[in-house]
Amino acid sequence: MHALGRQILVEFYGCKERVLNDTEHLRQVLLEGTRKSGATIVSDTFHTFSPHGVSGVVVIAESHVTVHTWPEYGYAAVDIFTCGETIDPWAIMHHLEAELGANNISSTELKRGLFPQKKLHKVVVKDAVGV
Amino acid sequence: MHALGRQILVEFYGCKERVLNDTEHLRQVLLEGTRKSGATIVSDTFHTFSPHGVSGVVVIAESHVTVHTWPEYGYAAVDIFTCGETIDPWAIMHHLEAELGANNISSTELKRGLFPQKKLHKVVVKDAVGV
């Protein structure tokens, strides 16, 4: 069977609270990890929550990377969803591992969209809408 | 154990190709489903791919909703990641189910960030950065 997408779900426990609450730093960490994977960054949006926490999404031509942090728990939930054969989603995970300073990490890789035959898949961004 | 987040992964097979390739329509479907769940929409970004396919992200105060479509396969991968007790993530799934016209659906619900004790969690958007 051919999988259209692969998805890595990562739980980062025991992270540095300071890093999990610094939106711009976290954004740079995610963007740098995404670049290291070879993915093409299309757009990103990061939000800071009160009293604490950050949510961030990096849309890539090959799908997406998301992060949600709970600094008060030292916890970050990261999803890395990719398609195509040219990028290494684990490079993002390893970059985050180094930057977040997690004590414990739990990760799972899933296959998304299983089909018996392979067809062409999307690679080029044509247009964008949104607010 | 208390889960900080819950995540629903949905595979929509046998969808209407026209719907999966219509970026603005798909965006409205996702936004409407998200509203029905009771979630607070923070921002959204949708991209059209060549020769076909759409990627979309709706950032909500309670985490995110994403969609990636492969119209040539009639397939859409949807993730609904939520936190808090006030919204119904399955409402998004059911709205998409009606709108995408899928022949087959496979869904899984996961718990993210398990801790023995419950603390306050993020609810208010304070600031946003991104391109």
Image: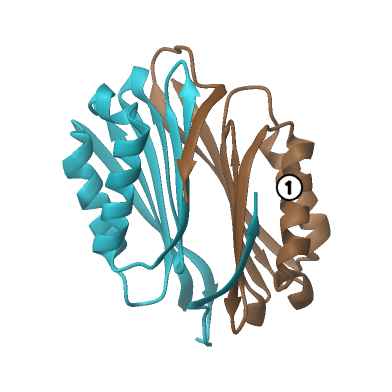
Chain colours: A cyan, B brown
Q: Position of residue B61 (x, y in %)?
A: 59, 31
Question: Would residue B59 be found to the left or right of residue B103 on screen?
Answer: left
Instruction: Tell me what residue is drawn at x 31 percent, y 61 percent.
Output: A89
Q: Chain of mark 1?
A: B
Asked if A3 appears above or below A8 in the picture, the reply is below
Mark 1, secondary structure of its residue: helix
Instruction: Tell me what residue is drawn at x 42 percent, y 20 percent.
Output: A52
Q: Amino acid under label 1?
A: Leu
Instruction: Tell me what residue is drawn at x 72 percent, y 45 percent.
Output: B92
Residue assigned mark 1: B31
Q: Nearer the viewer, residue A41 or A114?
A: A41
Question: Would residue A125 be found to the left or right of residue B34 on screen?
Answer: left
Q: Position of residue B131 (x, y in %)?
A: 47, 51
Asked if A8 appears above or below B15 in the picture, the reply is above
Instruction: Tell me what residue is drawn at x 25 percent, y 45 percent.
Output: A96
Q: Position of residue B109 (x, y in %)?
A: 56, 42
Q: Nearer the viewer, residue A105 or A83?
A: A83
In the rendered image, is residue B33 in sight?
A: yes
Question: Would residue B12 be found to the left or right of residue A8 on screen?
Answer: right
Asked if A73 appears above or below A26 in the picture, the reply is above
In the rendered image, is residue B68 in sight?
A: no
Which image quarter is the N terminus of chain B in? top left
